[in-house]
Image (cartoon, grey):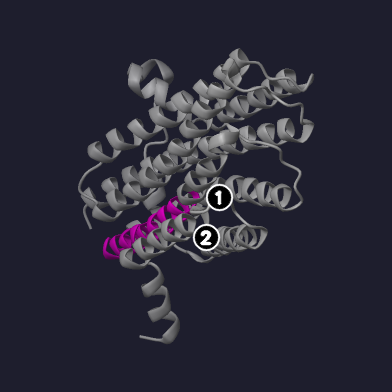
């Protein structure tokens, strides 16, 4: 085993990922003990998180171009890369504004420090979950390519073994809902609606409690329903261990983002309920819009990844049952 392979194996080891999460928790606990985060502490936190995110994105994107023999692997990697871009851009915008002191308050000022810690740990867990998922997505690719070559010439026509789809009238209600929700056109409409919604409610630089409730509940319901759907799907698609572990990684990453969203909006609603007085800060509103767009794009990209995973499972199942 070469040095590069040994390093790669160590990075993708679950013990390494657990150590990264523990280190992040200890770091945030240490710098938050005095109730204040100094500029150098924020810079260290931000640079580490930004580098972590973009280096991981570069790796995922490069892998999507290097894997050969099964197009579904490329699509899965590309979907993961797109979901990472939305989060990475959000992180970069946040720390850029934080360092230049362009943000006034994010959620609820007395608990703002706690909220930053929750977000930081949630993002670290998300990135570690991506590493976990990518590892087993690559194993999925190796499983499929190996099986397709065992089937002889079938590896040349294996993508065509998958049934392209049923007519809408032939689908059950569950299949119809799944098809419509995971369709790229539906997701583009969702992103467009999110953009129009935030533009309308932010144009006067005043987001009311009711408007925030609509935004927050939409994201919270979308995130947790999607997580439940992933859990159900992973139980239905048994028999492929590497795929199940990839699903576990996606579920963990999604849970981390969902918890962050939940904590943010609970604090935000508490503030808007009138407990504290809202100070006019235009850049705070723009940042909240950017965060909302990033989260919507992340959820939509994650739904596309799930669609590709389901397609991958069907192709693998059909190929494994085909005669050599």
- Residue 279 position (above or below residue 210): below
Q: Which residue is labeled 1 in the image?
A: 84
* Image location of residue 59, percent across then percent down: 54, 64
**Residue 161 visible (yes or no):** no
- Left or right of residue 251: residue 189: right
Label 1: which secondary element: helix
Picture quadrant of residue 145: bottom left
**Residue 32 visible (yes or no):** yes
Q: Residue at x 64, y 25 (%)?
A: 194
* Viewer-nearest residue: 31 or 162: 31
* Image location of residue 220, percent across then percent down: 47, 27
Q: Are dots 1 and 2 in contact, CB under 8 Å?
A: yes
User: Which residue range is magenta in the image?
Assistant: 123-152
Label 2: which secondary element: helix
Q: Which residue is labeled 2 in the image?
A: 60
- Left or right of residue 36: residue 15: left
């Amino acid at each position: 085993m070469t040095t590069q392979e040994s390093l790669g194996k160590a990075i993708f080891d679950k013990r390494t990922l657990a150590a990264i999460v523990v280190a992040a928790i200890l770091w945030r606990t240490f710098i938050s003990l005095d109730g204040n985060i100094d500029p150098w502490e924020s810079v260290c936190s931000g640079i580490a998180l930004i580098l972590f995110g973009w280096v991981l994105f570069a790796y995922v994107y490069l892998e999507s171009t290097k894997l050969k023999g099964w197009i579904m692997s490329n699509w899965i990697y590309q979907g993961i890369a797109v979901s990472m871009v939305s989060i990475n851009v959000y992180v970069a915008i946040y720390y850029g504004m934080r360092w230049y002191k362009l943000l006034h308050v994010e959620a609820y000022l007395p608990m703002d420090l706690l909220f930053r810690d929750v977000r930081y740990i949630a993002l670290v867990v998300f990135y570690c979950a991506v590493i976990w998922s990518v590892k087993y997505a690559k194993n999925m690719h190796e499983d499929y390519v190996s099986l397709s070559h065992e089937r002889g010439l079938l590896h040349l026509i294996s993508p065509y073994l998958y049934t392209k789809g049923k007519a809408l009238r032939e689908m059950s209600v569950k299949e119809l809902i799944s098809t419509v929700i995971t369709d790229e056109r539906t997701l583009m409409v969702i992103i467009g609606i999110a953009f129009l919604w935030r533009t309308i409610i932010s144009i006067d630089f005043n987001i009311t409690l009711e408007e925030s409730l609509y935004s927050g509940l939409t994201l919270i319901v979308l995130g947790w329903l999607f997580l439940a759907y992933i859990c159900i799907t992973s139980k239905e698609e048994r028999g492929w261990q590497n795929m199940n572990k990839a699903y576990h990684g996606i579920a963990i990453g999604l849970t981390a983002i969902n918890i962050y969203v939940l904590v943010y909006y609970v604090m935000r609603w508490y503030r808007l309920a009138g407990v504290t007085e809202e100070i006019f800060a235009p850049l705070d509103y723009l940042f909240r819009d950017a965060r909302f767009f990033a989260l919507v794009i992340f959820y939509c990209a994650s739904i596309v990844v799930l669609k590709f995973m389901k397609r991958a499972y069907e192709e693998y199942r059909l190929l494994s049952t085909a005669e050599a």
